[in-house]
């Protein structure tokens, strides 16, 4: 069997088993220009007619590697032009924006990359088309993920590594090793580019790829495949335990808590899975926190502080989580990048972000453009803004007033109560406010006939 046949068989099994798109929709190929993503593009191009989906490609230039990043962008542009695959290129300009506190450059790059994928997929779906994003994760990536999580400490669910499918995200090459990918590209004489930073041991994943896995492959040449197979087994086992854990929690529910005796009587693996599930609902995870909950549940301690605002308690035979009174969050302590969807805001309540097709939005509301009153032209926002609360020297130009003012002056002149000013949600690029709670979008961003996509923000304060 040729290397091409091997890889197409692997991808074919994925499309047969994963519930991937058939008979319509768009699959966006996340295309970096490296061998994995180039192989993925060719494989998707092979399966697109069979599966009945339209193929597009996405490339994000993070702006981190200078001329090399420009080389990658030019390469994928030429490649997609040759293969007649439509390409969308984004620019993150990471060198020009500060990293969020506590976030590494690698993590920030991944977040911005997936923000870009999500925006394009949501925009396609807003136009009435089912959209998916295919990423070039391989069995080698899965092996690295498993080793990384085991070294850091993980549960059975974490040992499951990378799933073949997660929502709209597809991984058709997850069953192939990096060696198989390279052999496939060589056999077909497919050109690709190489990220020079992949060969530098500056982060955990690179250390695993460059040092740990080669040692394991000396012990057993099939180490990568075996690690990936273990991850797949762990994922199935974790899903089964999750089902048992949810049944346990449902049966033991009592008011806002759970019957401690009934929980404690469950088999240890099921109990740990149930506590991990409850912690996840509290936006927490980790073996140590599961252990603390077990101590409370089994009566070793009365309560255990799990975070600054959540405490696990047992009282009257009931195990429950106690929420501390909320302390106002300072403006400089958080920010959330603009992305489609509905999410909670640290200062209370939630915000919903919609990115929709202009013409479709107009047609839905009968051509009256009523829905566009509080909408902005998405294409005019060139950088990724963030949601946050006000900071010193923020400026805003309210629509229809023809004047730019500092937020401090504007809110004071408009009589906004002092206690509310630091809790107002805003969307900004640097110190320029694009949208302000209670005011809408700034002047100059209004959606106009002829634009492609509109941005709408729905703010729901805390009840």
Image (tube, rainbow, N blue to C red):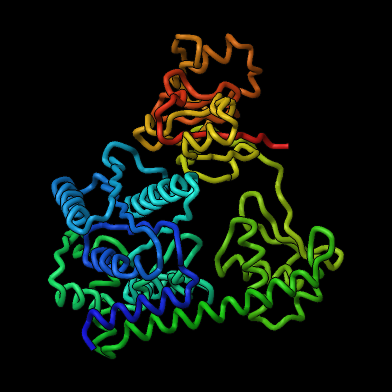
Is 193 located above or below residue 368 in the figure?
Answer: below
Residue drawn at point x = 68 percent, y = 77 percent: 244
Q: Check the picture and name the quadrant holding the C terminus.
A: top right
Visible in this render: residue 455?
yes
Q: Position of residue 420 (x, y in %)?
A: 64, 24
Is 332 located above or below residue 23 in the figure?
Answer: above
Q: How many marks?
A: 0
Q: Position of residue 399 (x, y in %)?
A: 50, 16
Closer-to-camera residue (139/420): 139
Closer-to-camera residue (176/413): 176
Residue drawn at point x = 28 percent, y = 40 percent: 93
Lateral position of residue 101 relative to residue 360, left or right: left
Q: Position of residue 90 (x, y in %)?
A: 30, 44
Q: Quadrant of residue 268?
A: bottom right
Q: Check the picture and name the quadrant holding the N terminus.
A: bottom left
Visible in this render: residue 422?
no
Residue drawn at point x = 42 percent, y = 73 percent: 15
Closer-to-camera residue (461/28): 28
Residue drawn at point x = 50 percent, y = 48 percent: 128
Is 13 located above or below residue 431 in the figure?
Answer: below
Q: Quadrant of residue 318?
A: bottom right
Is 115 located above or below residue 328 in the figure?
Answer: below
Q: Quadrant of residue 4?
A: bottom left
Q: Position of residue 139 (x, y in %)?
A: 34, 76
């Amino acid at each position: 069997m040729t290397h091409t046949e091997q890889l197409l068989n692997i991808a074919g099994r994925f499309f047969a088993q994963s519930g991937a798109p058939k008979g319509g929709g768009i699959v966006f190929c996340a295309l970096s220009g490296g061998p994995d993503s180039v192989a993925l593009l060719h494989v998707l191009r092979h399966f697109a007619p069979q599966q009945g989906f339209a193929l597009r490609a996405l490339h994000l230039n993070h702006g981190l590697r200078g001329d090399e990043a420009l080389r990658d962008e030019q390469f994928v542009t030429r490649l997609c032009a040759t293969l007649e695959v439509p390409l969308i290129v984004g620019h993150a300009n990471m060198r020009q924006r500060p990293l969020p506190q506590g976030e590494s450059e690698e993590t920030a790059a991944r977040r911005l990359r997936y923000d870009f994928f999500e925006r394009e997929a949501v925009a396609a779906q807003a136009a009435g088309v089912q959209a998916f994003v295919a990423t070039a994760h391989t069995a080698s990536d899965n092996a690295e993920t498993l080793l990384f999580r085991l070294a850091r400490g993980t549960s059975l669910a974490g040992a499951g590594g990378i799933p073949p499918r997660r929502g709209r995200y597809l991984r058709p090459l997850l069953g192939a090793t990096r060696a198989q990918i390279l052999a496939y590209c060589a056999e077909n004489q497919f050109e690709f580019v190489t990220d020079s930073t992949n060969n530098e041991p500056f982060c955990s994943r690179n250390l695993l790829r460059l040092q740990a896995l080669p040692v394991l492959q000396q012990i057993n040449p099939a180490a990568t495949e075996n690690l990936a197979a273990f991850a797949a087994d762990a994922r199935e086992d974790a899903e089964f335990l999750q089902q048992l854990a949810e049944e346990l929690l449902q049966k033991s529910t009592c008011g806002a808590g759970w019957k401690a005796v009934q929980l404690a009587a469950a088999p240890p693996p099921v109990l740990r899975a149930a506590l991990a599930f409850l912690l996840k609902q509290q936006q927490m995870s980790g073996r140590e926190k599961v252990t603390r909950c077990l101590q409370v549940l089994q009566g070793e301690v009365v309560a255990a502080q799990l975070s600054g605002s959540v405490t696990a308690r047992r009282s009257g035979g009931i195990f429950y989580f106690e929420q501390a009174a909320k302390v106002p969050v300072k403006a400089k302590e958080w920010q959330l990048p603009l992305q489609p969807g509905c999410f909670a805001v640290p200062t209370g309540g939630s915000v919903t972000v919609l990115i929709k097709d202009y013409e479709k939005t107009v047609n839905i509301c009968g051509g009256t453009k009523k829905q566009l009153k509080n909408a902005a032209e998405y294409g005019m926002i060139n950088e990724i803004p963030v949601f946050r609360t006000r900071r010193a020297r923020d400026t805003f130009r309210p629509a229809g007033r023809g004047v730019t003012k500092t937020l401090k002056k504007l809110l004071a002149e408009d009589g906004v109560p002092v206690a509310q000013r630091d809790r107002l949600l805003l969307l900004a690029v640097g110190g320029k406010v694009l949208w302000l709670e209670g005011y809408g979008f700034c002047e100059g961003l209004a959606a106009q006939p002829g634009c492609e996509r509109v941005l709408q923000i729905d703010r729901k304060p805390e009840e």
